[in-house]
Structures are given as structure tokens and as C-alpha cells.
Amino acid sequence: LRRARNLLVGPLVEEWTFRACSCPLLSSAGYSDAQAVWLSAVLFGAAHIHHRYDAKVPWVAVLLQFVYTSLFGAYSSYLFLRTGLIYGPLLAHSFCNLMGLPSFGRVPGHRHAWGLAAAYLAGMASFV
């Protein structure tokens, strides 16, 4: 059930709300495409703060959650505005939820730390 929520229901509802509804609404309100991308991205990031806040984790983790969900939101909004289709952002969102963030905490003690860090960075760069 959790897998269906994370890979299908969550991405579908969030992409419909933040891309298919918010982006056209912001554009019709006179915002430029760039402004619509970043405003919807910040709203998307803010909508995810509760995941960390409820867990009583340090504010640094909450800020990190906000930053990376906002950056993903900007990417997803860009995809939507560029193509006019929800499928790309939806698939990207599901894929990100499936993969999660890399385990950066494991890099420093790993015997191949530089190679692992390079692979993480290359993977993130190639996604964009």
C-alpha cells in the first residue's frame, strides 16, 4: 500500500496539483514561465516540509528537504511547461520516489569514497 502511495498516488496527485493546475494558473495570472516554475517549485517544497518536521528532526534536515524538493519541483515544472504534458513530470516524480536520495553518509568511510562520490554526482547531473 505504501509503495502504491509513493510511486503512483502521491506523484499523480502532486503533479496534477503543482504542475497541471498551478503552472497554468500562475501563467494566466501574468507570471512569466520562469516565475511560474520557481513559485510552483517553492510551494511544492513547502508542501513537503511536514515530512521532516513531524519526525522531530533538526532544522538542517528540514531545510535540506525543502531545497531538494523545491529543485525537483522546478525541474518538474519546467518539464510540464516545456511539453504541455503531465506524463514526463509524473514519471520523473515516481522514479525519484523509487530511487530516493543517494546515501551520502556512507561515502566518507567507504574504501572507494572518491569513485562513489563521483558516481553519485554524475548520476544526479545526468538526471537533469
Image (cartoon, rainbow, N blue to C red):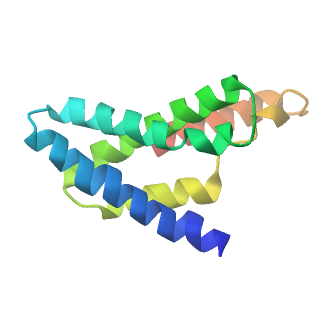
- Left or right relative to 14: residue 49: right
In the rendered image, the vertical position of residue 12 relative to residue 71, given as above or below: below
Return the residue nearer the eye: 23 or 86.
23
| Quarter placement of the N terminus | bottom right
- Left or right relative to 92: residue 81: left
Image quadrant where residue 17 sits? bottom left
| Quarter placement of the C terminus | top left
In the rendered image, the vertical position of residue 42 relative to residue 93, given as above or below: above
Tally the numbered discs. Answer: 0
In the rendered image, the vertical position of residue 52 relative to residue 96, given as above or below: above
- Left or right relative to 111: residue 38: left
- The residue positioned 51% from the left and 36% from the top of the image is 125
- The residue positioned 41% from the left and 65% from the top of the image is 12
- The residue positioned 46% from the left and 61% from the top of the image is 11
In the displayed orientation, state which residue is furthest to the bottom. Answer: 1
How far from the left and from the top, in percent, is residue 69?
50, 39
How far from the left and from the top, in percent, is residue 93?
47, 55
- The residue positioned 42% from the left and 42% from the top of the image is 44
How far from the left and from the top, in percent, is residue 24?
17, 49
